[in-house]
Image (cartoon, rainbow, N blue to C red):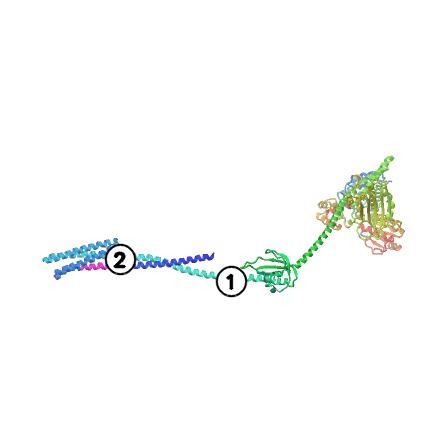
Amino acid sequence: MRTRRWLSVYFLLAAFDIAAVSISLYLNHLIVSRYAESIEVNRDWADRQGIYASLGQLAATVNTPGNDVFATGDIDAEEARLAARAEDFRVRLREARRELVLDIDPADAGPLLDLLDRSAQEMEAAVASGLSIFDALRAGDAHAAGQRMAAMDRRYNRARDYLTELDARVRLIQRRTLDAQAAAAADLRRFEFLVGAFIVLMVVGVTAYGRLLVRQTHRAARERERYLAEIAGQRARLEAVFRTAAEGILTVRPDGAIESANPAAGAIIGVEPGDLAGRPVRSLLAPDAPIPDAPGVAIETVGRRGDGRAFPLEVALSAPAPAPGGGVTTWIIRDISERKRIESELAEHRDHLERLVEARTAELEDTHARLRASERLASIGTLGAGLGHDMKNLLFPMRCRLDALDRLDLPDPARAELAQIRAGLDYLQNLSRGLRLLSLDPEDPEASGGVTDIARWWDEVGALIERSLPAGARFTARIDRDSPPVRVAPHMLTQAVLNLVVNAGDALGAAPGDVGLTVRHTDRTVTIRVEDTGRGMTREVRDRALEPFFTTKQRGLSTGMGLSLVHAVALAAHGSLRIDSEPGAGTTIDLTLPVGVNADPDAQADSPASPAGAVTAVVSVRDARLGAFASAVLRAAGARVIRASALNGFTSPAVWVTDRPDPAQRDRFLAADRRNRIVSLAADIDPTPGLIRADDAGRTDRFRRILAEALSAAAGAGGETPT
Amino acid sequence: MTPDPIRVLCVDDHAFMADGLRARFDQEPGIELAGRRSSADGLLGAVDETAATVVLMDIEMPGPDPFEAIENLARHRPDVRAILFSAFVRDHYIDQAVAAGAWGYLSKGDPPDDVVRAIRAVAAGEFAMSREVADRAAGPGPKAPEPDTPRSKLALLTPREIQVLRLIGRGLSRVEIAQTLHRSPKTIDVHRASIMEKLGVNDRVDLVRFALREGLAEL
């Protein structure tokens, strides 16, 4: 578009230039022709002037004979002369007249003709007078001749005046004509300046245009150079890409032959890139290997290396670059053998993971179910504990009132009723304790404390448990009397086993059946098995059996707490509960408990070395309360406690609890028996073997433990003497 | 000369408790119910008003901390002896009771006869523990005691922390706890964080549950 504009400008300039030149030429022509014309006109008038001048002369010659006759006296000759000259004059005048009429503008010619005519008239009169002169002379009238001569001269002067005026008029006309011509020339000259200016413009325009063109040309040349440089740069970059790309890049001619290949392509195929040129591109693929049917789409196919081995190859094509005879196609190839390998590995991993996830999910669901159950249990336990607590607050006052009633003098029926009420309260008391068990946390010391010797325990509770069964039930108990103790408190064990046996009895219903209780043990566990030949549980019931409040019994007969309670006891003791049951085939429940390390304290009483019971404890502490506390603790542990202000009498083994151990007494006490121990509440005491410092008596738990240690040491159990 | 009767002040928020005790004491020579209060608030004043010689104090009650009240009582009226009387028996209660200056710790599960006996023993200058308490107070058995493992996680807590835990168990907000203990809420936060760390508990719900289980609070 710029070019077109430039072209238009060019044409405009050209047109302008031509116009300017044409106008100039035309103007020139006009000026020259005017000039020529004016010369012509001026010459004409000059000629006319000449003619009129000659007319004047002729007029003079006409006048002369009339004058000359007086001198010459040759009348005839003069008359002939006069006539001849008058004729000349007439002829000349006629010529002039005709010329005027023919060649001059009537406006101008009019007055001139008039003057000529008047002049002619006067000359005719003069001629007439002249002729009359001759007549007079002939007549011999000289006087008359003289008068006629004067008249002739007068007429001649008038004619001459008219001719002079004619001349003047002609001059005027000449002047006027000259002026007009000069004006016309001046006009034209004005145009000439204009044209001159145009021509200057034209020159300037052409020059400017020329320079612009030159600049354009230079700019175009620079642009072209820049484009070329850019192209070169791009080309260099493309070449760099071509050379360094990790993918193989091939350019393929329309006939399928490889035009060029980059080093990566060579590496993929396993030949020098130069060797690829000229080969059919199909030779790089396995026979019948597919290639993409659309540009820009990468497909997986099978390539063929230089040594003929097949390998997985990814191919993408470009659209052919347009060129005459078909364009060059670019092929991008990638060796995907590694990728394929990884894909198959991933698939294997994925399968493996899926299997793992399935397994874990199943585990997780199981865990969740158990968690939900245990959470429910925890909530129930919390509620239960609270309930149990509340119950104790009510039961105590009720028992107080019962005691009060008991002391009254009541008739027997009333006493019997009271006994029933008391039994009910005892049951509730147990229930509250049982509810408390539900909330037990295995960390809870109450859960983990306590040991039960099975044989002795069964001796105590066996009858009670058996009595809980309905009449039609046959009960068999097989108790292994060598069973090690279990790490569960006796009352909890009773509660648990009682629940199991009662359930077993209920399972029999009204029908007769068998209930068996067996105790077996291993090195680390004791298993109590309760089995019945009752109706058994369906799978659904079995799954929910441990849920608190779940019961298959009629409402009112069971709170549904039994098995959940047993389970709680098992969990608290770090044991387990297992239920085997099939509908119609009875139920077997195994309660497995860990073996207890500590022996039943009651059992100690039977063993020969009855330690604690043989120990004397002397408490001489000024703080009466602290002393009372220490006494109570020691007494509860089985020692024989003496409260005294000083260590007076004692029998070894002994424990002396004091806040001011007199050194002499101290030595005497410790020397009396190696087992004797002093628990000193004094702060500033030297360490002595056999003396235990308890100066931080504010830490009651530590104090209790120290008392227990001292007692234990005095009892002869444990060799080390703590300091 | 008959010795002065033992006058028992019952501090328990359960209405029946005092009535039951009265019914029982009526059967006992030398023991009478001096009065009842439903919280440890104003214990000293109550003791003065009722001329009590023994205080039977419940632990789970709304109002001021019973242990603090006992401490206060022991300081100002050492002649009046306080016995803790709770539905729950815990090792840490024993320790707290002794530390606070109590003369006994009884369980509401004990038969009323035992309670009466215990009151008499305390009046006579002995320390009273219910059977359950005695079993635990005696410490680990003669054989192989577990060294230094606390028997209850509560033993890990300081008395102040146990106080805070009790109030948490009752459902008080931290501001309310702060007001009750005359501390700033920030201090309560510190205590709570320490408690949770020591007990290995991650959220308030578990804290409350723990408190309820341990009998630090009732529902």
Q: Residue at x 53, y 62 (%)?
A: A229
Residue placed most toward the observer, A289 or A684: A289
Kind of residue indicated by mark 2: Gln
Kind of residue indicated by mark 1: Glu
Residue A52 counted in the magenta span: yes
Residue A720 counted in the magenta span: no
Rendering coords of residue A718 (x, y %)? 85, 54
Q: Name the residue under label 1.
A: A225
Q: Which chain carries label 1?
A: A
The residue most toward the front is A288
Q: Which chain carries label 2?
A: A
Q: Name the residue under label 2.
A: A174
**Quick one: SS at disc 2?**
helix
Q: In this picture, which residue range is highlighted in magenta?
A: A39-60
The residue most toward the left is A140
Task: Tell whether A214 sits left or right of A316.
Answer: left
Crowd tier of the residue under label 1, counting other residues whose Cα lies within 10 Å: few below 14, some 14–19, many 20 or above? few
Task: Tell whether A37 sits left or right of A347.
Answer: left
Residue placed most toward the observer, A604 or A699: A604
Q: Choose mark 2 or mark 1, whichever is in front.
A: 1
Rendering coords of residue A272 (x, y %)? 62, 65
Task: Tell whether A583 sits left or right of A198.
Answer: right
Q: Main secondary structure of the magenta part?
A: helix
* Residue B77 in view in this figure: no
**Quick one: SS at disc 1?**
helix
Q: Quadrant of residue A506?
A: top right
